[in-house]
Amino acid sequence: MRRLASIPLALWVVLMVLSTASADVALIARDGKVGFRIPYVVTIAPGTIFYETSGGRDYLAGSPSSSSTVGCTTERQWKTGDGRLLCVSFEQNPNGYIMKLSASPNEGISKWGFALKASDNEYFTGLMERVVDGDDNESWREGITQALDLRGQKVEMVVKPTTAVYAPFFLSSRGYGLAANTTWPGLFDFCAESPNLVQVSFEGPSLQCHFYTGKDPAAIVRAHAMESGPPFMPPKWAFTPWRWRDEHVHRPTYYDGTRVEVPYNSQVVEDILMMEALGIPCGVYWLDRPWAVGSKGYEDFKWDEGRFPKHIEMTRWLKQKNIRLMIWIAPWVMGNMHKEARARNYNLPGQTDKNDYWSLIDFTNPEATNWWQQPLRKLLEDGLAGFKLDRAEEQVPCDLAIRAHDGRTTRELHNDYPHLYIKAVYEAAKEVRGDDFVLMPRAAFAGSTRYGVFWGGDADSTDLGLRASIIAVQRCAVMGYPFWGSDTGGYRGRYEPLDREVTARWLAFSAFCPIMEVGPTRNRSLWDMPTEPQYDTELIAIWRLYATIHDRLADYSYRHAREARASGMPVVRPLFLAFPDQKEAWGDWQTYLYGSDILVSTIWEKGKTQHTLYLPAGEVWIDAWEPAKEYEGGKYLTVEAPLYRMPVFIRKGSRVNLGDLQALYKDSLARAAKRPDLAQLQKTVRSARP
């Protein structure tokens, strides 16, 4: 460990003001250790700025050898003991300051870093949708207590499966945000190693970071969202309820033994007819893999006619019912396309799975990207309304010795790969369908928000999996991903009995997410459960209740989506974004605003029939379940919370009208009690055949 050669400095003296435009950014020092003070409350601790080479770590110290100011940018330079010229610059812009750390020459530099001073009880959030770093199973481990606040954690900025939405941006309760403008791997330490320091380091020959400054956390979140985006604008139909299964089978009978007499996949037809008869709204249906030919169900983008006969006609039948169809894709090819990709060197070198039956596409190669897009265009022309984009964070190499087509090492490319993947699909969809499509990836990194909506990976189908998803939607909102949904009921453990209580609570939570997608429910449905009651009247009624609420909110959601697109303000808003001066708003992570006027408080614990939440001060809140009850904010409130009922409050004075929710649930129970007759229902399919 070495110090940079320079002249000693006096104890804690401010050496100079960087420029008139950025007058508050000051160079500070202590015992020869150099740091910076950035308004309003951001301080790079003296003696913490460093770069690394094979020879070790060098720290910035002493007096600068030169300085220059051009416009709003001031640069300071230090001559180093190893013959480099080290440069630190700050450029002021309307949202804060951009800091650049660089050196000339920069050969051999492998990492840069610095540390920020942290105050006691300072709150940090952002970076990733998972609750804690590491294997995503850690996010729903028994006894977990971490929630939105990252304090005390270390986060490796490397996209990992399968809860895989990331952004190198965090928000501090102290009045600033920090975004690292790089795709290289990095590390954030939030007072874990040192109780009063946030330590930041990233690999690469240089480092650029944006410090967003201001006292309003919502303004910081908005500014970052617009600079990393602006976010994709989904069509209005995306805010209606979605339905899917993990693996569709074309069976000769429906769940109740009725013989199938329709020309389309029996499980798709069963879902649509049953939901329609039960009054459960559905605007989007998607098919997961396998949907194509081959042993893995994904060869050459060619439909499996045995599993999905007359798929084009089926797509039209769904469209007649105002239901859009989407399918699963991945950033790799199989079958003949795999062989062709290898022959043309279109594959990304170094994929970690060495099985020779599939190939990751190198999206840094324009020729390979266009080749891969061609079958997607055909699928869209046949009527598909979008794609679920899986993977992009699995088997993607992260190696300094392997280079992609554009010359970058896969170490630098790894985090950028999800962004390149969705961008390639977006370009094909935009060409064919204009603005009338949706893409929903599992993995994301900086820039991905411009192209789609996002889903919360393969969450555990337990109460703790639901807990993790409640945290995930709010973290994503802070990171600049305003459109997000989770697999309602969870995904992992799908061969275990479905937990009906967790599923009921998850349905309520999903109704107040921008994307409400119900599935995979063990490839079954709530009228065909693997446990008793197999025909679950109560759960069907709860599904209808919350799907109807979500459907009623489509215009409201769309209006707030337009706001997200225009200003960066997320649809889901942790309480501290709207009420930052109320300390309780930073503590009640189970409660958030859906848009500007609806407050919901999620329930994830099993066996809970009462719930305590914080109602923010400065507003009067109307109980959506009992509209005669109004509450002055600024206090905690305990409410009844039977299985079907999640606490929902409306801001008094707003135009939101959810209708009579008690009557809706009563009607849903009555509707669910009458089991639909599939023998009669399928006759309507034959008469509507194109």
Image: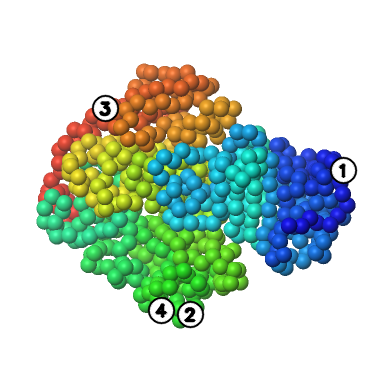
Label 1 vs label 2: CA separation?
63 Å
Q: What's under tag 4, amino acid-wise?
A: Lys
Query: Which of disc 2 and disc 3 is earlier in sequence?
Result: 2
Q: How is the image coloured?
A: rainbow
Residue at image coords 51%, 56%:
159
Three-letter code, disc 1? Ala
Residue drawn 31% across the image and 51% down it: 493
Residue occupied by mark 2: 344
* Residue neighbourhood size for the residue with mark 1, other residues' Cα within 10 Å, grouped as few (<14), some (14–19), many (≥20): some
SS for tag 2? loop
Amino acid on which disc 2 is placed: Arg
- Name the front one of labels 1 and 3: 1
Q: Residue furthest bottom?
A: 343
Of marks 2 and 4, which one's residue comes earlier in the chain?
A: 4
Examine the rendering and report whether any part of residue 591 can be seen. Answer: yes
Q: CA distance from mark 4 to mark 3?
A: 59 Å
Give the Cα distance between marks 1 and 4.
67 Å
Q: At 80% from the left edge and 51% from the top edge, which residue is drawn? A: 61
Circles 1 and 3: CB distance less than 8 Å?
A: no
Residue designated by label 4: 339
